[in-house]
Amino acid sequence: MSTRHVLNAERRTLHGHFSRDLPPVLTIDPGDTVRFQCLDVGWGLEPHNGIDGNRREFPGRDPVLDDGHALTGPVFIRGAKPGNTLVVRVDAIEVGQWGTTMAGGWHNAWNDRLGISEEGIFHVWTFNHEAQTARNQHGQTVTLRPFMGIYGMPPAEPGVHSTVPPRATGGNIDCKELVVGSTLYLPVAVEGGLFSTGDGHAVQGDGEICVTAIECPMDRVDLTFDLLDDMPLTTPIANTPAGWVTLGFHEDLNEAMVIALEAMLALIQRLHGLSRLDALALASLTVDFRITQVVNEVRGVHAVLPHGAIR
């Protein structure tokens, strides 16, 4: 019988890195559901003021181990071992009360390329949960479409791994299609998987071109976990309301596209019993390739096969 668990955002559950050596804060069985509470990406305890970065943040952060995104976890799934596939079903997501979009104002390769590293702005958003909209301090309104930027597990290699670049085992995927109703499939690299989530987004466009979405805390993220031992993967894939999605990550956008393509061809072959060449011909007619993000050290490309496109 499945069990429901709760992980609140507190000192014992919060961390800002991935590592196979990070002790789990919860152990579950396949079929169990976990309700996560998550801080925003910057460990904030209150909204930004719209002027600068000064605000209350979660105290006592370790400068190395808590340097990245605020993640809640990790969760140990009994029976998970390298070579398995972790199944993550997104059952519910509820945004908090506020969010922030930051554009420019700090140095990284992307901001430097755009010439916006020296001066930045803050858009501070308040949410109308009933209407599912967000409104900023300038009066602009956008529609909410919440998802978690990070669903992931550590790689097999020991040590501390940054939360910034996504990997084969997930992480900072930043794919806007991973909304409620999606099921994400991730290759397991370490015993127990050690799954964490964080980086809540109230809404984001493909590309995430100013480095941030509407970054927000999440009051509730309900995820149900399972394991497969007959679906080997080398990169994440997902079954979403928009269709089947395969993801590719690489420093080179062309290579990221090829990774997503190879995963999509394998998926079409599996779903429809086709040869690789037949899958390629049909993919050229039915599959869209989109730039997931370009701002997380590696580029992301996701391929989308709409439901019913191949019958």
Image (cartoon, grey):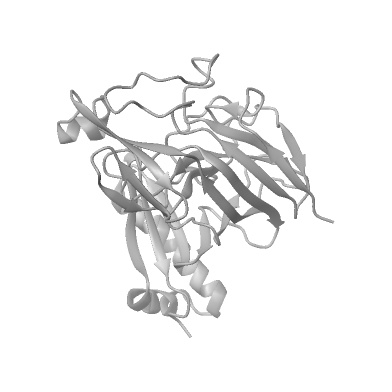
The residue that appears at 33% across and 74% down in the rendered structure is 284
Identify whether 108 is placed above or below 94: above
* Residue 138 in view here: yes
In the visual, does 165 lie left or right of 21?
left
Whether residue 191 is visible, yes or no, is: no
Q: Nearer the viewer, residue 16 or 22?
A: 16
Q: Tell me which residue sits at (29%, 50%) in the image.
A: 141
Would you place residue 218 above or below residue 204 in this image?
A: above
Residue at the far left: name it: 115
Residue 152, given in percent of the width and then of the height, sits at 56, 43
Residue at 33% over, 25% down: 49
In which quadrant will I find the N terminus?
A: bottom right
- Between 41 and 289, the residue placed more toward the observer is 41
Q: Is residue 248 left or right of residue 120?
A: right
Q: Horizontal and vertical percent for residue 240?
A: 50, 64
Residue sitting nearer the eye, 196 or 81: 196
92 to 169, vertically: above or below: below
Give the percent coordinates (x, y) of residue 203. 38, 49
Residue 248 locus on image (x, y percent): 41, 53
Find residue 261 and report its image quarter.
Answer: bottom left
Q: Nearer the viewer, residue 50 or 71?
A: 50
Side (left or right) of 102 relative to 41? left
Rendered view: 191 above or below 242:
above
